[in-house]
Image (tube, rainbow, N blue to C red):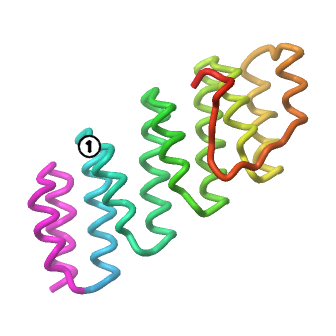
Amino acid sequence: MGFALLDIVEQQARSNKLDAALDTASRITDATDWSSAMEAIAIGQFKAGDRHGALHTAKLIPQEISRSGVLMHIAFAQARSGHVNGAIETVNHITAPLRRDAVLLGVALIRARAHEIPGALATARNIGSELARTRAYREISQYGWLKPSEKKSLSRPVAPQSVSFANHPV
């Protein structure tokens, strides 16, 4: 029964019938299916423009890997659509370090492709993994000339608990 209800929730979420999807999901008794239903609903809410609802729903997902997957999806979509501040806020909800770094790397590269080199560097500095941070710097450097001050900033790695860009445009 749970699998059939999950199929219905996914179809309702894709059709932007989110209230109906939430109602259907409330009848799912299997924890794994319920978690999958919440993933579908969160993504549906985000696509419908309800960012806060999507984040709230994502936080209800009990499995960290599933919750992080939804938050990654949302953050990448925000960054690709030019909502970098929203993407950074979403990144701060991801607790798995490798997934968090993957999103920050993606956001840095999206910014670099948009020729926002200072913002790309600011994002890259917040990547916790030295390997991922180095990759980000290498790829950012391919998108344009770096000013001397930007080249110096490449040697100052930072691994914060939350991302903040107080001194850089976001």
Q: Give the range drawn in magenta.
A: 1-29
Q: Residue furthest front?
A: 166
Residue 88 left/right relative to 162:
left
What is the quadrant of residue 23 in the picture? bottom left
Q: In this view, does 70 lie above or below 135?
A: below
Q: How crowded is mark 1: few (under 14 residues within 10 Å), some or many (20 or more)?
A: some
Residue drawn at x 11%, y 53% as measured from the top left = 17
Kindly report the secondary structure that dominates the magenta region of the rendered protein: helix
Q: Is residue 50 above or below residue 19?
A: above
Q: In this view, does 75 lie above or below 12?
A: above
Residue drawn at x 35%, y 67% as measured from the top left = 60
Residue 76 left/right relative to 16:
right
Residue 95 left/right relative to 139:
left
Give yes or no for residue 52 being in the magenta stretch.
no
- The residue singled out by tag 1 in the image is 50
Residue drawn at x 63%, y 19% as measured from the top left = 116
Say which of 115 and 27 sits in front. Answer: 27
Q: Where is residue 112 in the image (x, y as percent from the top left)?
A: 65, 25
Residue drawn at x 16%, y 78% as measured from the top left = 4
- What's the residue type where badge 1 is placed? Asp
Q: Where is residue 11 in the image (x, y as percent from the top left)?
A: 17, 60
Number of numbered discs visible in the structure rendering: 1
Q: In which quarter of the image is the C terminus?
A: top right
Q: Where is residue 136 in the image (x, y as percent from the top left)?
A: 74, 38
Q: Quadrant of the N terminus?
A: bottom left
Look at the numbered disc 1 and give the secondary structure of its residue: loop
